[in-house]
Amino acid sequence: MVAARRKRREAVFRAIADPTRREILGLLRGRRCTVGEIASNFSTSRPAISKHLRLLRSVGLVVTRRNGTARICELNARPLRAVSVWLQDYEVFWRESLGRLRHYVEEGS
Amino acid sequence: MVAARRKRREAVFRAIADPTRREILGLLRGRRCTVGEIASNFSTSRPAISKHLRLLRSVGLVVTRRNGTARICELNARPLRAVSVWLQDYEVFWRESLGRLRHYVEEGS
DNA sequence: CATATTCGTAACCGTTTGGTTACGGTATTG
DNA sequence: CAATACCGTAACCAAACGGTTACGAATATG
């Protein structure tokens, strides 16, 4: 089961790599949405959004419930903890790099 | 140049999506390495690692310096701040989501 | 000068990805 | 029951991705 867990962690990184999927997560941060509501925020087709949602569900970032013909989607941010944990090992490094860059020209954020 | 900055932020998410590249970053967290040293840690060919390094350099996560025929690679974790900032908006959600989602789950895959 | 070491790049290839259109399945509604 | 609304999936396609081999440039080294 360790391998499966790692595979799922892998998948979370790939899930958030796509800008459309990150935007979907951002929408669901504000409120629950049906699939159609989510799709109406994008210029891409509804089936494309459906595929993104399937992937997001597969990694647990989105949870759904049926309500009539509609399917209501809700954010589950817990899998993002794995990313946060991974990032923690680097935090000290970007603090250090800030110090080293102090006397150089501002790069801009 | 706001668009260029966003594009670069975009690229950071894709850069860390690949497990080999994350492993490279992990190696460089410990010490500086030449390209060959990095490649010796993987079963893939050196040119493949070279391509990963080119991508990592393009997003600023790796900086290099030439030393004879060798090229020394060093970690620059600063671009990861963008990921950290993005994650912060979700932190509150994974803290409170546990109990709220318990009765909501339909399916995970 | 000749040779070896280190590394980047070009060319190519199979797989994955993200998009589309077409279609069907399942409630809700008149 | 017939019609409609909502949504998932299959089939297909162009582009991106990650890998390989082959080659060449640049710098030691004998």
Image: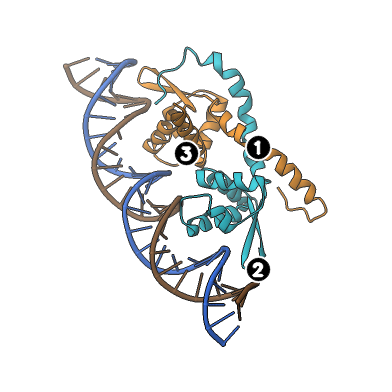
Chain colours: A orange, B cyan, C blue, D brown
Q: Quadrant of residue A70?
A: top left
Of all chains, the one bearing label 1 is A
Nearer the viewer's eye, disc 2 or disc 1? 2
Q: Quadrant of residue B23?
A: top right
User: Disc 3 sits on a residue from what chain?
Assistant: A
Q: Nearer the viewer, residue C1 or B46?
A: C1
Q: Which mark is first along the chain, 1 or 3? A: 3
Looking at the picture, does residue A22 appear above or below residue B76?
above
Amino acid marked by disc 3: Phe
Pointer 1 residue: A89
Q: In terms of secondary structure, where does tag 1 sit?
A: helix
| Mark 2 vs mark 1, CA separation in Å | 31 Å
Q: Secondary structure at mark 2?
A: loop
Q: Name the quadrant of the N terminus of chain A.
A: top left
The residues tagged by marks 3 and 1 sit, at their Cα atoms, a distance apart of 35 Å
Query: Badges 3 and 1: C-beta atoms under 8 Å apart?
Result: no
Please name whichever residue, A99 or A2, is drawn nearer the observer in this view of the structure: A2
Q: Is residue C8 above or below residue B84?
A: below
Which percent across, then down, holds residue A7? 45, 34
Please state which of residues A58 and D7 is positioned toward the viewer in this rendering. A58
Residue type of the residue flagged with mark 2: Gly
The three-letter code of the residue at mark 1 reads Asp
- In this rendering, the count of numbered labels is 3
Residues tagged by mark 3 and mark 2 found on one chain of the structure: no
How many other residues sit within 10 Å of disc 2, few (<14), some (14-19) or many (≥20)? few
Residue A62, image x, y percentages: 47, 26
Tag shown at residue A42: 3
Q: Which residue bears the numbered disc 2?
A: B68
